[in-house]
Amino acid sequence: MLKSCFATAHRIFPVMMQEQLLSLIRQQGDLVRKLKLEKKDSSIIDIEVSKLLDLKAKLEDGNQKKFVLKAPKGTRDYGPTQMAIREEVIQKVVQCFKRHGAQTIDTPVFELKETLTGKYGEEGNKLIYDLQDQGGELLALRYDLTVPFARYLAMNKITNIKRYHIAKVYRRDNPAMTRGRYREFMQCDFDIAGSYDPMIPEAECLKIVAEIMNAVDLNAFELKINHRKLLDGILTVCGVPEDQFSTICSSIDKLDKQPWEEIRLEMINEKGLSPDVSDKLEKLICLRQNTCSAASGKDLNATLLEELSSHSMLKSSDVAQAALNEIKLLLSYCEAFEIEDKVVLDPSLARGLDYYTGCIYEAVLLGEDESSVGSVAGGGRYDKLVNMFMTKGKDVPCVGVSIGIERIFAIMEHKQKLSGEKVKSIETDVFVASAQKNLIKYRMSICSELWRSSIKAEMSYKANPKLLQQLQYCEENGIPLAVIIGEREIEKNIVKIRDVASRQEEEVPKIDMVKSIQERLKNFAV
Amino acid sequence: MLKSCFATAHRIFPVMMQEQLLSLIRQQGDLVRKLKLEKKDSSIIDIEVSKLLDLKAKLEDGNQKKFVLKAPKGTRDYGPTQMAIREEVIQKVVQCFKRHGAQTIDTPVFELKETLTGKYGEEGNKLIYDLQDQGGELLALRYDLTVPFARYLAMNKITNIKRYHIAKVYRRDNPAMTRGRYREFMQCDFDIAGSYDPMIPEAECLKIVAEIMNAVDLNAFELKINHRKLLDGILTVCGVPEDQFSTICSSIDKLDKQPWEEIRLEMINEKGLSPDVSDKLEKLICLRQNTCSAASGKDLNATLLEELSSHSMLKSSDVAQAALNEIKLLLSYCEAFEIEDKVVLDPSLARGLDYYTGCIYEAVLLGEDESSVGSVAGGGRYDKLVNMFMTKGKDVPCVGVSIGIERIFAIMEHKQKLSGEKVKSIETDVFVASAQKNLIKYRMSICSELWRSSIKAEMSYKANPKLLQQLQYCEENGIPLAVIIGEREIEKNIVKIRDVASRQEEEVPKIDMVKSIQERLKNFAV
């Protein structure tokens, strides 16, 4: 992979051409001026002037074809500061996944087009990035990490695994970049595949979200839960035709952003639901919003469960009652996991993707202004997806959660900017500086000694840098220590160790340099 | 990004259709058998038989459209074991980059097509993955990390940075997968941009390669170095026409895989070089190969430098002499960095990519059989690439190195397989097991307590798992400790802590559980 093919020289021609052109224009200009000075015949001058204008037009053309210097629409580069923040957050997420015994896997950035087709619904299909047909297989960039995970399980006949996957996914969405949505963005997925007893893996997924939210200091959040089969039951008893479940759920899904009245009109006018059915729906779907919340949190959940279980219409729905029992069980597990005060049952939670078959959930930040409130994690059970890749065999039940890490990054970046503190993107502990000229090789050998002892060290790439500039570099980059050498130090076989913040210096025998630095670094770390 | 669009239900129809079809075929078969038994008129039977055959043909059709369950050509998934090995290697590489004061950046997986066009030469252009034109910008997957880095520098007007970037790149190559080449593969790049004194950044790049090779225990390697301007000088004095430099270099680049005689014929027959020029070339290009290597390593370098500097033909070439002086300087810096015994001057090293303008180098593994020897790292100076993205402004001189991490992964995986040792892909320290039924919530609360103390803990997702199975899980996954609880333990407010390897158990007051486990883990770590 290191070897590559040879470039032809044409790549440097645009620059050369422009320079040649400029030189030709200069020559031609000189010629025209000379002819004019010499008062030559105007017909001769005109010919040369027109040549000059031609050359200038060519230069113009070249400039108009100027390169567009940008990252593709909806994508962005991450500089060192952003990367330092991102890596810190990702490390916390990974630590949490590993704390829960998860392994990691990786899959290619693109899949066969047919692997993705028909998994995300009509709108999703429109947002998939296709690769150009250059002969061979038809490919497309992954849209999420869940479908590739299901493909991986089916292909390797894995029926049971707890895995995390942190990678970028691609959606040709219309990016509202101010709201932190991009066409290339990272997802952190944790999933449990396998046949287990009800609600135990679900409870762990919720626990993981709570732990991650705490780890990144986003403590004001709630975990909304609902159940696809409760939704099915509600839609059935209210009289929504079965072939409209998907589209009506899609309307309900917008309830966190729009008031019921708008949703109602959409359902009636665009989707042809009768006003009567719609009003029945509201009573059950908006139960949480409309319940007097004197009771809050845990008590409100109990009240809602009680109301739904005994509701005159829902009583007759076996699926709804089974779902309510699962929710009850989940809530009791959340108590054992000490997250019950974060969990709220919300019958209006619908979740976008169609592959969910059971419990669904979303983490929502509280206390921000309405418009910017959005989910920072979401997931649920999808028991049928793996089977879509298999011609035979039993279901591989799965449940998982995706952390909306980009939104967390955005919040962290914002916090960091507000705090005014500088983010350290360089981890260097020691800068090796020289006070005199011609010591480059001595600096190199000192660095070499430090690196050998796993000490993070840098030096200037100038052969004879100024001491002041070297020390400034330390201050600007938060490097805590400097080793300073000069002819006197070399003679005496010592080094000067400088504490950059306090500017105090100490002379240390060269043989003790590493030990002394390691001790100082230990003290900084405390 | 968590919300997505709604899928229609058509995705589950293929499975349903097939089942319906099978049921229809069964019914129709029964009908035909019944008609035959009843000895009905053959014209009636024939009609029903033809219906049956139609149904069977439909089933056939459906089966032929069976889903191809695979990762795209030239790509692969990485399972947990492979990922554990990969992450260990990457961590060592990152540690080294950070030890040298590098920051990291990230760029999108695709770039504007025009950003990549004309940077990799004719053959490279052919290997670029284009995205389909779905309206908007024309995009292509990145081919390496160097061109996106140059685009990033130009766009952000950065003239000076030391950065690393670890990410996957894409080449529509014909993958020889047995040799560890893929169409999607990872690169680990370290680059220094900025105007510095000659050969100091180059020396650090070589030092970094040496450190990484040591860190991953690949000690039998050499660092081949050469200089593009020395090559230019050699080609000039031998009489290669300037417009053939690129293509002749491309031939020379194959010298590590083919003997000179083959290269010679290619240059003469395919590229029209005169036999005389070719023979002159051999004398200089193959100088290292043809020099009696009684002198080795450092001495051989000195001998070669001496021969080249005083060579009757090269004496007249200013560029070659300047390059030789730079090489001399670099070798002296390598001595200060204590890597001089690894560095070998080799005038036949050419490197593929055309953007190099100065010193070039490659790390080559020694001691393997000829056919599999390949470079595991490579790079060089490219002072003009950033400028290709700017309409004005000074050059941003750059030098860097790319670690051929996939090859290192392959070697590590191979070593691991030979060793027969199991790779730990799960980091769990404690398994919380129960000896009796109905303790799921108690196990949950114990896990919760352990997670709160940052202890990596797991439990079974079954409500009533068997103790033996729980302990087997620990043994299979190398989990060192188990906390075992039963009714007796709950009553006495204790837990049993089991050392999985020795099978010894100890009863500990529940209040001391975390402390006791932390101490045990500390001892394991020692």
Image (spheres, coloured by chain):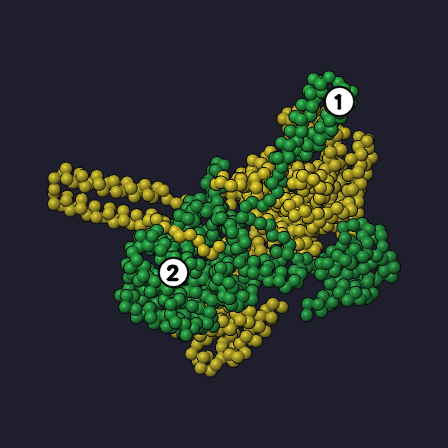
Chain colours: A yellow, B green
The reply to whether residue A269 is visible in this rendering is: yes
Up-down: is B279 above or below A197? below
Q: Quadrant of residue A83?
A: bottom right
| Residue A510 point in image, percent of width and height | 51, 79
Image quarter of residue B420? bottom right
The image's mark for residue B260 is 2
Q: Are marks 2 and 1 on the same chain?
A: yes
Give the foreground label among 2 and 1.
1
Quarter occupied by the N terminus of chain B: top right
The residue depicted at 46 percent of the width and 75 percent of the height is A485
Q: In this view of the protein, which residue sits in the foreground, A200 or B53? A: B53
Q: In the picture provided, is B181 more to the left or to the right than A223?
A: left
- Tell me the amino acid under the disc marked 2: Trp
Q: In the image, residue A65 lies at what x, y percent? A: 36, 42
Q: Residue at x 33, y 52 (%)?
A: B269
Q: Is residue A449 positioned above or below A60 on the image? A: below
Q: Where residue A380 sits in the image (x, y, percent)?
A: 69, 43
Determine crowd level at label 1: few under 14, some 14-19, many 20+ residues with C-alpha closer than 10 A.
some
* Mark carried by residue B270: none
